[in-house]
Amino acid sequence: MHRDHEPPACATALAIAAHPDDLESWCVGTLLRMIGRGTRVTYLICTRGDKGSSDPAATSESVARTREREQREAARRVGVECVEFLEFEDGFLEDTPELRERIVREVRSVKPGVVFAHDPVHPYPEYTAHRDHRVAGRAALDAVYPLARDRLCFPEHAALGLGPHVVREAWLFCTTAPNRWVDISETFERKVDARLAHASQTSDPEALRSAWRQRAESTGREAGITLAESFKVIRLES
């Protein structure tokens, strides 16, 4: 177990999630620390969260517009300038060549040292983890290794000026098998503030703040720190 509780050090990072608000839920405390140290972070959101409403008057398109706007505001609050949406349908994300190609294209464009993604092998919660989370995580891992690395995978990218890229590590969030904990004591309040930008998904801001503090405390307890986010860190082969 690593005892330094530090985030990864890299010039650029790519954070891949299934839905708007997933990154705020699981890794923005860590991303804030990285951004504070000069890392340029890009968000890649696989869907627009278009099914995330119980409002009987809402449509998928109206929900998608709201959630996309909220995600961009949440990103602005943490200092992320680039947010890309792949616009696959919420709830029906599939591990297809198209999804993997779109992720590979972004990896080759951003050239991240580290990729953040959902843990598809040990997802939280066990058995009932959202299927889009599992699919997004699996596609992300396959995209960074080996597809983005290998020149002959998606050779049409060369016409876009994009060449192979090797990602050093994958930091998998929303995991039941963590092997790394990051101290977010100094960034916790800004993490919550970013999550509260997703107003359509927040019925009681104070209850959310309290529940999230309890979760961060529980997560940190295993590593002996006050407030933490946890990850399964995978060292990728070159």
Image (spheres, rainbow, N blue to C red):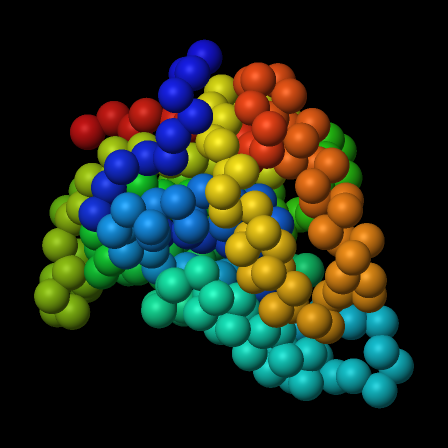
The answer to whether one can see residue 185 in this image is: yes
The N terminus: image quadrant: top left
**Residue drawn at 62 percent across, 18 percent down:** 222
Which residue in the rendered view is the most extreme toward the right? 56
Q: Nearer the viewer, residue 70 or 142?
A: 70
**Residue drawn at 11 percent across, 66 percent down:** 161
Residue 53: give x, y in percent of width and height.
78, 71
Residue 30: give x, y in percent of width and height.
45, 42
Q: Relative to residue 219, is residue 182 drawn left or right?
A: left
**Residue drawn at 43 percent across, 26 percent down:** 5
Q: Relative to residue 228, is residue 235 drawn left or right?
A: left
The C terminus: image quadrant: top left
Which residue in the rendered view is the most extreme toward the top? 1
**Residue drawn at 49 percent across, 42 percent down:** 186
Above or below: residue 149 compared with residue 154? above
Q: Nearer the viewer, residue 191 or 10?
A: 191
Q: Which quarter of the figure has residue 205?
A: bottom right
Q: Nearer the viewer, residue 115 or 77?
A: 77
Above or below: residue 215 compared with residue 34? above
Q: Which quarter of the figure has residue 8?
A: top left
Residue 3: give x, y in percent of width and height.
42, 16
Residue 35: give x, y in percent of width and height.
34, 52
The answer to whether one can see residue 86 in this image is: no
